Image: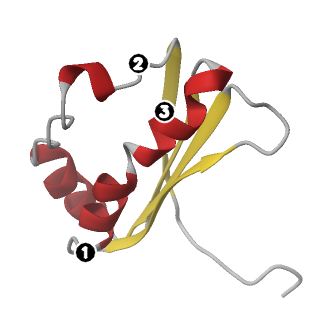
Amino acid sequence: MVIVAGVFEVDPEQRDAFLAGKFDRMRTSRAEQGCLEYTFSADPLDPGRVLLYERWASQEDLDAHLAVPSAPPASPDSEVVPTSVTIMVYDVTGERPLGG
């Protein structure tokens, strides 16, 4: 399993628009082979942060996802550009329920 976790810093007044611009990408990605989770979400404590969380069954599935170009925004003016982006990939060697 592979986990991708990221942080997008955006203008707090544009965060809702940034998230709305990711809905189609979330729907499409969740339908891809090996996608276990794909979510952009608002940080509840920081209005200028958006979190990305992905889980993929394998590195091959993530590679296939990354090889597909993302759709362009509906219009160039509709895309909110983050002020910074940090995305990390974690290779998971095992998993277990919390407390188990």
Foreground pick, 16 / 100: 16
Measured as percent of width and height from the top left, residue 59 is found at 29, 58
Answer left or right for 71 relative to 17. Answer: left
x 48%, y 32%: residue? 87
Callout in the foreground (2, 1): 2
Query: Please, what is the three-letter code of the amino acid marked with disc 1?
Result: Ala
Name the residue carrying label 3: 87
Query: Please, what is the three-letter code of the amino acid marked with disc 2?
Result: Val
x 75%, y 84%: residue? 97
Q: CA distance from mark 2 to mark 3?
A: 15 Å
As drawn, the label of residue 31 is 1
First of labels 2, 3 by sequence position: 2
Foreground pick, 5 / 26: 26
Q: CA distance from mark 2 to mark 1?
A: 25 Å
Name the residue carrying label 2: 81
- Report if the CB atoms under discs 2 and 1 are less than 8 Å apart: no
Q: Badge 2 local density, few (<14 within 10 Å), some, or many (20+)?
A: few
Q: SS class of the residue under badge 3?
A: strand
Measured as percent of width and height from the top left, residue 1 is found at 43, 67
First of labels 1, 3 by sequence position: 1
Q: Could you tell me which quadrant the C terminus lies in? A: bottom right
Query: Please, what is the three-letter code of the amino acid marked with disc 3?
Result: Ile
